Amino acid sequence: MKEAVARKVVRRKDYTPYPWEIDQLCLRFDIDRRITTVKAEIQFSRLDQAGGNNAIVLDGEGLELVSVALDGRPLAAGEFTVDADRLLIHRAPAKCLVSTEVRIRPHENTALEGLYPSGKFLLTQCEAQGFRKITYFPDRPDVMTRYEVTMVAERALYPVLLSNGNAVGNGDLGNGRHWVRWVDPHRKPSYLFALVAGDLEFIEDQFTTCSGRNVVLRVYVEKQNLDKCGHAMKSLVKAMQWDQQRFGLEYDLDIFNIVATDDFNMGAMENKSLNIFNSKYVLAKPETATDDDYQAIEGVIGHEYFHNWTGNRVTCRDWFQLTLKEGLTVFRDQEFTSDMQSRAVKHIRDVRDLRSRQFPEDAGPMSHPIRPDEFVAINNFYTMTVYQKGATIIRMVHTLLGEAGFQKGMKLYFHRHDGQAVTCDDFLAAMADANGVDLKRFGRWYAQSGTPEVTVRSEYDARTARYTLHLSQRTPPSHDQASKQALVIPFAFGLLTPQGQQIPLQLPGEPGPEAFTRLLILEQEQQSFVFESVPCEPIPSLLRNFSAPVKVVYDYAVSDLAVLMQHDPDAFIRWEAAQLLAQAEIMRNRDCLAQGVEMHLLPQLTEAFAALLGDRDRDPALLAEALMLPGEDYLAETMKVIDVDGIHQARQFVKRALVMALQELFEHVYQGLNQGGVYDHGATSVARRSLKNLCLSYLVETPAGVSLAEQQLAHGNNMTDTLAALAALVYSGAAAAEQAMASFESSWKQDPLVMDKWFVLHATRPGADTVDLVAALMDHPAFSLTNPNKVRSLIGAFALGNPTGFHALSGSGYRFVAERVIELDRLNPQAAARIATAFNRWRRYDSLRQNLMQTELERIAATENISPDVAEIMSNALGKL
Ligand SMILES: [Zn+2]
C-alpha cells in the first residue's frame, strides 16, 4: 500500500520529562469570530541546573505568529524558528518570560479542536492536543501551571465570557466592548483549559459541600433550550452528593459551570470548573428525551464531574496513560448509575456494550492494550478499549480488594499524587501498597491486548461427592502482539442442583462450606479447583456478575440454561442464560438457511420465553433485557466468516416465530403495562416502559401489533413511548412506517436532538436499498456535514449500525461511506476517522465483500492530503495481516 502521509509514530517508551517548569501562564484574548488575537506570557524556570542558555520548544499548529519576545525584548529572525507544529527559541536563560502574540481564525475551524464557533457563541475543545491551535505552549499533560485569562469582546455579541476558576474582575472599555478576567488557583495541564464567549442564558442552583463551601452551579445554554436544563442540574447535585458519600471527595472551587453546545466531537469535556457538553447530554424534557437519554445525561454529568478528582487533580503523565483517568472515571460513573438506578440492569447493559463493541476492537486491526504503546493520532485512541475495558479492569481491582480495600487505595492514591501527572503504574502501586498486596502480575492487563478465552471442563464423582472444575485461559494472538501471557482472572463461580437450588461451596481443607459464590483466581494457563460435599451432579454457574472481561467457552445443555435462567441468584447469569438460549436458536436457524433446510423454532426457547413473560416477581427492566434478542453485531462476532444476511434473516425469523407462538402472552404483558396516565421518570415507571416497549417490538410483527404501535404513537405523552412505537414500525417494515416518519418529522423539524433520532431510524432500517435514502437525506435541511451529531446519526449509524445496508452485496454501502469519509476528512478528521473504522473488520467477510471493501480502503488511503487520523486507521486495516 502507498503511504499517503509520512506516519509520525509516538512511542510510550520514548517519554522524557519537559525540561522547564512553568510558574504561570497569562493569556489575553481579543475575541472575534473572524480573527481572534491571543497574547500569552509564560514564566519559565529551567528544571535541571544545567545553567547557561537552553532552548525552549513550544507546540503550535495553524497559528499566525505576530511577535515573540524574551524578557520583554522582541526576538529577531535567527533567534527563533517556526515550523508547522512548533516554535523553537534557540537560547533562553534559566529563568525567563516568553511573550507571544498570535492570530487565529475561529470561523474557519471545522475540526472543532481549539477555538471554534457554535451557533451564536465561540468555545474551545483542547483535549487531547487542541491547545496548540490556540497559542504556542508545551501542550502535554505533564506540564501544569496556573492560568490567568483575560477576555476582551464586543458586549452585544459576547455578553457572557467564561473560563476556568473564579471570575476576579470585569469592566467596560467603551465603544461597546467589555472585559472579564478569570483566575484558576489550581495548577492544570493545557488540555483542561476552556473558554466560552457568546450570547448564552443560564439556570442556577447552589450546593453546600460537606465542609461547608457554598458552590454556585450554572448550566448555560442558548435561549431556546432554557426549559430543558432541569434534569442536568439535578444530576449534577446528585453527583456532587454521591462523590462525597461514596468516595469522600469534595468539590474545590466556588463555582461550577456547564455549557451545552450542538457542535461537539465527543460527549462532554471535564475542563476545570467549566465543563463543556454535547447538548445531547444536557437537554431533556419528557416530550423530547427518552428514558435512556435521561439516564445517559445523569451518567455523563456524573462522569465529567467525577473527573475533577480522577483526571484533573491527579492527571495523566502522557496520553498513553489515558485509561488512568478514563477507565477509573467510567468505573466511577458506572457505580454512580448503579447506586442511583438498577445495579443489575446497568451492569448487563455495560456488558452487552463491551461485548458488541469492545470485543471486536480487541480482535481487529486497531487492537491495543488499555495503555497503548504507540500511536499516530491520539484521537484514534479514545476507544471502547481505553474507556470500557479500562473500567472493567478497575472493576476487577475493586472485586479483588473489596469496597473498603479499594477506598483505602483511592485515599493513598490522592495522598501521594494530588496535583501531579502520573502513570497507570502509580495507580496500581497505591492500590497494592494500601492493601499490602502484590498487583504486579495483575498489571499485565494494562499491557496486553485481546480478549482472553476461558475454557471450562468439569467432572463429578458421585462416590466421593467431589466436583472438579478445570479452567484454562488463552488470549488469541492479535495484530499488535504475537504472543500473550497468562492473566490474573477473578472468576466468580457457583453451583446449582438440577432443580435450581444453590449448593454451598467447600474447598478441600475447609471445615465446612463458606459461601454459595466463590471468587476463584485463575492466574496460570490451567488450574483445577475441587469442591467437596457436592450432593449431586451440579450445573455450573460460570463468571457470575461478569467478574472479568473474558469469553467463557463451555457447552451448556439447553436444559441447564433453562435452569440457570430461572433460578440462578445472579442477575447477570439469568440474563446470560436467556441470551445463550436465543443465540443458539438463531445460529441453528442460520445454519438451516445456509444448508437450504427450512427454518423452524425448537420448543425450548419458546418455553423459556413463556416462563420469562409469565414471571410477575421479576423486575420488568431485567425481564426486558433478558427478552431482547442478541444483536446482529454480537452474533457476527461468533462466526469465523460473517454471514450478514443469514444472521439478519435467522434473527428476524426467530423473533417472528416467538411472537406467533406467544402472541397472547406478549399482548397480555403489554396491556398490563400500558396504563397511560401522567408521565413520571421514577425507576418503576422507567422499568415498566422498557418491558412494555420490548413487547411492542415483538408484537409489531403481527397485524394487531401494528395497530397497537399506531395507537401508542397517537396517544403517547413522552418520547420514550413515541420513539419505541416509531422504531417498531420502521424496523418491522410496516406500511404505516412512512406516514408515521413524515408526521414525526413535521412535528419535530425545529428540534435538532429529536431530528437526530429520526435520522438514526432512517439510517438503521435494514435493507440493501437504505443507502439511497441515506444519500438523499444528506440534502435534508436538518442535516449538516459540519455537525458531528448529524454525521453520527446519519452516516455513522448507517456505517456502524446497519449491517445489511452497509454490507449490501452491490458494494453501494461501502462506496457511499468511503466517499463520505474522504469528504468529511477535509472538514473534521476526528469525525472522519471514527466513521472509517466501519471497514476495520473487512477480512472477516466473504471474499466478494472483502474485495469490495479493500478497493474502498485503498481509495481512501490514496487520497491526497488525507489526515494522519484517517491514514492511521487505513494503514492498520490494510497493512497488517
Ligand atoms: Zn472522561
Image (spheres, grey):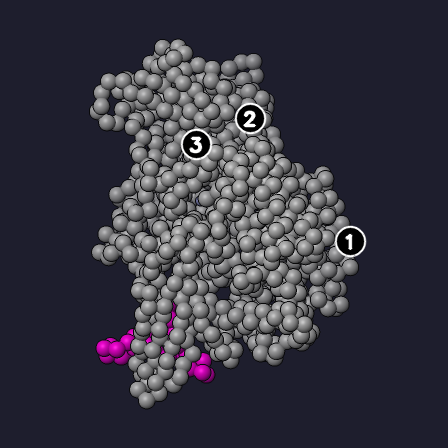
Indicate which disc, 2 or 3, sits on the residue closer to the N terminus. Answer: 2
Q: Name the residue under label 2.
A: 106
Q: Quadrant of ligand 1?
A: top left
Q: Can residue 851 be seen in this view?
A: yes
Who's the residue at 59% across and 48% down the image? 854
**Is 751 left or right of 367, judged from the image as shown?**
right
The CA span between labels 2 and 1 is 42 Å
Give the percent coordinates (x, y) of residue 24. 34, 25
Give the percent coordinates (x, y) of residue 856. 61, 45
**Is 730 left or right of 142, judged from the image as shown?**
right
Q: What residue type is labelled 3?
A: Phe
Q: Mark 3 points at which residue?
A: 193
Of residues 237 and 354, the one nearer the viewer is: 354
Who's the residue at 34% across and 29% down the image? 145
Of residues 871 and 265, the one nearer the viewer is: 871
Q: What stretch is highlighted in magenta?
A: 492-517
The residue carrying pointer 1 sits among few (fewer than 14), some (14 to 19) or many (20 or more) residues within 10 Å by Cα, namely few
- For label 3, being within 8 Å of ligand 1 is answered no
Mark sitting on residue 225:
none
**Is 707 left or right of 276, judged from the image as shown?**
right
The CA span between labels 2 and 3 is 16 Å
On whether residue 49 falls in the magenta region, the answer is no
Q: Name the residue under label 1.
A: 739
- For label 1, being within 8 Å of ligand 1 is answered no
- For label 2, being within 8 Å of ligand 1 is answered no
Q: Is residue 685 visible?
A: no
Indicate which disc, 2 or 1, sits on the residue closer to the N terminus. Answer: 2
Query: Compared with residue 563, is residue 246 higher up or lower down, i.e. above or below?
Result: above
On whether residue 500 falls in the magenta region, the answer is yes
Front disc: 2 or 1? 2
